[in-house]
Image: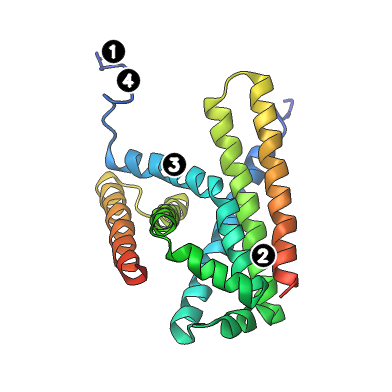
Amino acid sequence: MVRRIIVGAHYGLRDWLVQRVSAVVMALYTLLFVVILIAAPPRHYGAWKALFAAQPMKLATFLFLVSLFLHAWIGLRDILMDYIQPTGLRLGLQVLVILALVAYAGWSLQILWSV
Amino acid sequence: MTRQRPKYLDLLKIRLPLPGLVSILHRISGFGLFLFLPLLLWLFHSSLASPDSYVHYRNAIANPLVKLVLIGLLWAFLHHLCAGLRFLALDMHYGTDLPTARNSSRAVLIVSILLTIVLGVLVW
């Protein structure tokens, strides 16, 4: 018997998993954020700034945003694969989505670490 | 055995079952949230950068048009979250029988719309 792998690059399962892990990270952050809003609502600039000045909150928010961008990439890639048939156009749009998301990640770092 | 089934791809004639409706709305809401990421990041940036930019941020979200867009995005987020939690449950083989799948789809649609209305009224 010859054992051989007959499917392609194996990124399917990995992406499936990334989509779910990032979803769980975002759901947990959302829960944390709702608890903060209920327990100690930041009603003015000072309190809002103080919330994100704390390093654990910065890191948690950064993990949320990175999860969001990974999640958005897989979702957008699926949408483009389904609806955009011409290969060149699809590739171009995929590159645009990746560039936008990497730019958003840089922007997120700037927003969080200049507080 | 072959059965004659209606086969057409006219979007206006396709009658989706509830789980199908939740699924396509999951996709549409995710795409909408992606499109509005620059607006959301810009609002987040303004809210944190300085006391002056915070005032700009407060003025921006006080604009009724911006408020409407944000409430629309709130629905997109809530629907995407609720439908996503349902999909995670289905992945783990919870609620895969037809009556439960239909009921959980209905719950996703109703809960996300109700929460949007309640939160929308609170922030208006």
Out of B83 and B12, give the one closest to the viewer: B12
Instruction: Tell me which chain the residue with mark 4 is part of.
Output: B
Distance between mark 2 and mark 1 Cα atoms: 51 Å
Residue A7 seen in this snapshot: no
**Residue type for callout 4:** Asp
- Tag 4, which secondary structure? loop
**Tag 2 near tag 3, CB within 8 Å:** no
**Residue type for callout 2:** Leu
Q: Nearer the viewer, mark 2 or mark 3?
A: 3
In this view, B92 is above or below A92: below
Q: Residue B2 — which label? A: 1
Instruction: Tell me which chain the residue with mark 3 is part of.
Output: B
Residue drawn at 66 percent across, 20 percent down: A87
Distance between mark 3 and mark 4 Cα atoms: 18 Å
Residue B52 seen in this snapshot: yes
Out of A19 and B1, give the one closest to the viewer: A19
Identify the mark nearer the N-term, 4 or 1.
Answer: 1
Out of A4 and B101, give the one closest to the viewer: B101
Q: Which residue is mark 3?
A: B28
In this view, B50 is above or below B108: below
**Residue type for callout 3:** Ile
Q: Which residue is mark 2?
A: A63
Q: Are both tags, 3 and 4, on one chain?
A: yes
Distance between mark 2 and mark 4 Cα atoms: 42 Å
Out of B73 and B28, give the one closest to the viewer: B73
Label 1 crowd bin: few (<14), some (14–19), many (20+), radius 10 Å: few
